Amino acid sequence: MQVASSAARTGEVTALLRAARNGDAAALDRIVPLVYDDLRRVARRQLAREFGAENVRPTELVHEAYVKLSLGGADVAVDRAHFLAIAARAMRQVLVDDARHRRAVKRGGGWQRATLSGSHWVADFDVDELLTLNDALEELDPRQRQVVECRFFGGMEDSEIAEALGVTDRTVRRDWVKARAWLYRALAERGSANALAKL
Protein backbone atom coordinates (compact mmCIF):
# COMPACT_ATOMS: atom_id res chain seq x y z
CA MET A 1 0.00 0.00 0.00
CA GLN A 2 2.77 2.45 0.89
CA VAL A 3 4.45 1.93 -2.51
CA ALA A 4 1.21 2.76 -4.32
CA SER A 5 0.74 5.82 -2.14
CA SER A 6 4.29 6.98 -2.91
CA ALA A 7 3.77 6.38 -6.62
CA ALA A 8 0.49 8.29 -6.50
CA ARG A 9 2.21 11.23 -4.79
CA THR A 10 4.98 11.16 -7.40
CA GLY A 11 2.37 11.24 -10.16
CA GLU A 12 0.55 14.08 -8.43
CA VAL A 13 3.78 16.08 -8.10
CA THR A 14 4.49 15.60 -11.81
CA ALA A 15 0.96 16.75 -12.69
CA LEU A 16 1.28 19.81 -10.46
CA LEU A 17 4.66 20.69 -11.97
CA ARG A 18 3.05 20.51 -15.41
CA ALA A 19 0.30 22.83 -14.15
CA ALA A 20 2.94 25.25 -12.81
CA ARG A 21 4.68 25.31 -16.20
CA ASN A 22 1.30 26.09 -17.77
CA GLY A 23 0.82 29.12 -15.54
CA ASP A 24 -0.97 27.76 -12.45
CA ALA A 25 0.55 30.05 -9.82
CA ALA A 26 -0.87 28.02 -6.92
CA ALA A 27 0.59 24.69 -8.09
CA LEU A 28 3.85 25.15 -6.15
CA ASP A 29 1.86 25.66 -2.94
CA ARG A 30 0.18 22.30 -3.54
CA ILE A 31 3.47 20.54 -4.34
CA VAL A 32 5.31 21.46 -1.15
CA PRO A 33 3.11 19.42 1.24
CA LEU A 34 3.62 16.38 -1.01
CA VAL A 35 7.41 16.63 -0.88
CA TYR A 36 7.84 18.37 2.49
CA ASP A 37 9.42 15.35 4.19
CA ASP A 38 11.85 15.02 1.28
CA LEU A 39 12.70 18.72 1.51
CA ARG A 40 13.38 18.42 5.26
CA ARG A 41 15.60 15.38 4.55
CA VAL A 42 17.55 17.45 2.01
CA ALA A 43 17.84 20.32 4.51
CA ARG A 44 18.95 18.04 7.36
CA ARG A 45 21.56 16.46 5.14
CA GLN A 46 22.94 19.82 4.03
CA LEU A 47 23.07 21.13 7.56
CA ALA A 48 24.61 17.97 9.00
CA ARG A 49 27.31 17.63 6.35
CA GLU A 50 28.07 21.27 5.91
CA PHE A 51 30.49 22.84 8.30
CA GLY A 52 29.00 21.27 11.45
CA ALA A 53 26.10 23.60 12.13
CA GLU A 54 24.26 21.90 14.95
CA ASN A 55 21.90 24.73 15.89
CA VAL A 56 20.44 25.27 12.43
CA ARG A 57 16.83 24.25 12.00
CA PRO A 58 16.00 22.34 8.80
CA THR A 59 12.44 23.70 8.81
CA GLU A 60 13.70 27.26 8.49
CA LEU A 61 16.05 26.31 5.66
CA VAL A 62 13.15 24.62 3.85
CA HIS A 63 11.00 27.73 4.29
CA GLU A 64 13.74 30.07 3.06
CA ALA A 65 14.33 27.82 0.05
CA TYR A 66 10.58 27.76 -0.63
CA VAL A 67 10.55 31.55 -0.81
CA LYS A 68 13.43 31.41 -3.29
CA LEU A 69 11.65 28.72 -5.33
CA SER A 70 8.37 30.62 -5.33
CA LEU A 71 10.12 33.60 -6.90
CA GLY A 72 11.09 31.48 -9.89
CA GLY A 73 12.91 28.39 -10.99
CA ALA A 74 10.69 25.64 -9.65
CA ASP A 75 8.38 25.80 -12.65
CA VAL A 76 11.04 24.25 -14.90
CA ALA A 77 11.02 20.98 -12.93
CA VAL A 78 9.49 18.08 -14.79
CA ASP A 79 9.12 15.55 -11.97
CA ARG A 80 9.69 14.99 -8.25
CA ALA A 81 13.40 14.16 -8.58
CA HIS A 82 14.05 17.23 -10.71
CA PHE A 83 12.13 19.40 -8.24
CA LEU A 84 14.24 18.07 -5.34
CA ALA A 85 17.42 18.80 -7.31
CA ILE A 86 16.27 22.39 -7.83
CA ALA A 87 15.34 22.64 -4.15
CA ALA A 88 18.80 21.39 -3.11
CA ARG A 89 20.36 24.16 -5.21
CA ALA A 90 18.01 26.73 -3.67
CA MET A 91 19.01 25.62 -0.17
CA ARG A 92 22.68 25.94 -1.04
CA GLN A 93 22.00 29.43 -2.40
CA VAL A 94 20.21 30.40 0.81
CA LEU A 95 23.21 29.27 2.88
CA VAL A 96 25.65 31.06 0.58
CA ASP A 97 23.58 34.27 0.63
CA ASP A 98 23.58 34.22 4.42
CA ALA A 99 27.33 33.55 4.52
CA ARG A 100 27.96 36.49 2.20
CA HIS A 101 25.81 38.68 4.42
CA ARG A 102 27.73 37.65 7.54
CA ARG A 103 31.04 38.29 5.79
CA ALA A 104 29.82 41.80 4.85
CA VAL A 105 28.71 42.49 8.43
CA LYS A 106 32.07 41.23 9.71
CA ARG A 107 33.76 43.72 7.38
CA GLY A 108 31.65 46.62 8.53
CA GLY A 109 28.44 46.39 6.50
CA GLY A 110 25.91 47.25 9.20
CA TRP A 111 22.60 46.51 7.47
CA GLN A 112 20.25 43.96 8.98
CA ARG A 113 18.94 41.01 7.00
CA ALA A 114 15.36 39.91 7.61
CA THR A 115 14.50 36.23 7.36
CA LEU A 116 11.23 34.42 7.81
CA SER A 117 12.19 33.51 11.34
CA GLY A 118 13.94 36.76 12.12
CA SER A 119 16.98 34.88 13.46
CA HIS A 120 20.42 34.20 12.08
CA TRP A 121 19.94 30.47 11.95
CA VAL A 122 23.14 29.60 10.13
CA ALA A 123 25.46 31.37 12.54
CA ASP A 124 27.53 28.23 13.19
CA PHE A 125 28.74 27.91 9.60
CA ASP A 126 32.30 28.81 8.79
CA VAL A 127 31.60 31.59 6.32
CA ASP A 128 34.91 31.36 4.49
CA GLU A 129 34.66 27.58 4.02
CA LEU A 130 31.14 27.80 2.66
CA LEU A 131 31.99 30.60 0.24
CA THR A 132 35.18 28.86 -0.91
CA LEU A 133 33.22 25.69 -1.63
CA ASN A 134 30.53 27.68 -3.43
CA ASP A 135 33.10 29.48 -5.61
CA ALA A 136 34.70 26.16 -6.54
CA LEU A 137 31.30 24.65 -7.38
CA GLU A 138 30.51 27.55 -9.68
CA GLU A 139 33.62 26.74 -11.72
CA LEU A 140 32.53 23.15 -12.39
CA ASP A 141 30.93 21.95 -15.59
CA PRO A 142 27.18 22.65 -15.15
CA ARG A 143 26.10 19.00 -15.11
CA GLN A 144 28.87 18.02 -12.72
CA ARG A 145 27.80 20.90 -10.44
CA GLN A 146 24.22 19.58 -10.53
CA VAL A 147 25.45 16.09 -9.62
CA VAL A 148 27.38 17.49 -6.65
CA GLU A 149 24.40 19.57 -5.52
CA CYS A 150 22.05 16.60 -5.74
CA ARG A 151 24.39 14.10 -4.12
CA PHE A 152 26.38 16.14 -1.61
CA PHE A 153 23.81 18.75 -0.67
CA GLY A 154 20.58 16.96 -1.50
CA GLY A 155 21.43 13.45 -0.34
CA MET A 156 19.96 11.97 -3.50
CA GLU A 157 20.87 8.50 -4.77
CA ASP A 158 22.52 8.04 -8.17
CA SER A 159 19.27 6.75 -9.69
CA GLU A 160 17.35 9.81 -8.44
CA ILE A 161 20.01 12.14 -9.81
CA ALA A 162 20.00 10.34 -13.13
CA GLU A 163 16.23 10.70 -13.32
CA ALA A 164 16.39 14.39 -12.41
CA LEU A 165 19.10 15.19 -14.96
CA GLY A 166 17.91 12.84 -17.70
CA VAL A 167 21.14 10.83 -17.84
CA THR A 168 22.21 7.30 -16.90
CA ASP A 169 23.34 6.15 -13.46
CA ARG A 170 26.77 5.48 -14.99
CA THR A 171 27.01 9.08 -16.21
CA VAL A 172 26.12 10.32 -12.73
CA ARG A 173 28.84 8.17 -11.15
CA ARG A 174 31.39 9.32 -13.73
CA ASP A 175 30.44 12.99 -13.22
CA TRP A 176 30.67 12.57 -9.43
CA VAL A 177 34.19 11.08 -9.64
CA LYS A 178 35.38 13.85 -11.98
CA ALA A 179 33.72 16.63 -9.97
CA ARG A 180 35.01 15.33 -6.65
CA ALA A 181 38.58 15.05 -7.97
CA TRP A 182 38.42 18.55 -9.44
CA LEU A 183 36.94 20.03 -6.26
CA TYR A 184 39.53 18.28 -4.13
CA ARG A 185 42.34 19.88 -6.15
CA ALA A 186 40.63 23.28 -6.28
CA LEU A 187 39.94 23.36 -2.54
CA ALA A 188 43.46 22.15 -1.70
CA GLU A 189 44.92 25.00 -3.78
CA ARG A 190 42.72 27.44 -1.86
CA GLY A 191 43.74 26.01 1.51
CA SER A 192 40.23 24.96 2.43
CA ALA A 193 40.91 21.94 4.65
CA ASN A 194 37.49 21.83 6.33
CA ALA A 195 35.61 21.84 3.03
CA LEU A 196 37.94 19.10 1.77
CA ALA A 197 37.04 16.90 4.72
CA LYS A 198 33.36 17.03 3.68
CA LEU A 199 33.98 15.61 0.18
Image: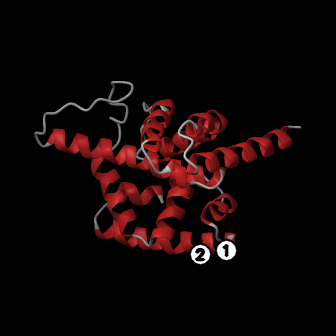
Q: Which residue is mark 1?
A: 170
Could you say where residue 104 lies in the image, as x and y percent from the top left? Answer: 18, 43
Quick one: label 2, few (<14), some, or many (20+) residues within 10 Å?
some
The quadrant where residue 31 appears: top right
- In the rendered structure, the answer to whether residue 69 lies left or right of residue 128 reads right
Q: How many marks?
A: 2
The quadrant where residue 156 appears: bottom right
Q: Secondary structure at mark 1?
A: helix
Residue positioned most to the front: 23
Residue positioned most to the right: 1
Taking depth in this image into account, of 157 and 192 the one nearest to the observer is 157
Q: Decide: is 11 above or below 5.
A: below
What amino acid type should be assigned to the residue bearing mark 2? Arg
Taking depth in this image into account, of 63 and 128 the one nearest to the observer is 63
Image disc number at residue 174: 2
Tell me the distance, in whole angstroms, between the alpha carbons under discs 1 and 2: 6 Å
Q: What residue do we see at 64% from left, 71% from top?
A: 167
Could you say where residue 185 lies in the image, as x and y percent from the top left? Answer: 38, 72
Could you say where residue 127 lies in the image, as x and y percent from the top left? Answer: 29, 46
Q: Secondary structure at mark 2?
A: helix
Q: Decide: is 14 above or below 137.
A: above
Q: What residue do we see at 66% from left, 62% from top?
A: 158
- In the rendered structure, the answer to whether residue 24 lies left or right of residue 111 reads right
What amino acid type should be assigned to the residue bearing mark 1? Arg
Quick one: label 1, few (<14), some, or many (20+) residues within 10 Å?
few
Callouts 1 and 2 close, C-beta under 8 Å: yes
Q: What residue do we see at 63% from left, 36% from top?
A: 37
Q: Decide: is 86 above or below 66.
A: below
Could you say where residue 96 lies in the image, as x and y percent from the top left? Answer: 34, 48
Q: What residue do we see at 68% from left, 49% from top?
A: 14
Q: Which quarter of the figure is the N terminus placed in? A: top right
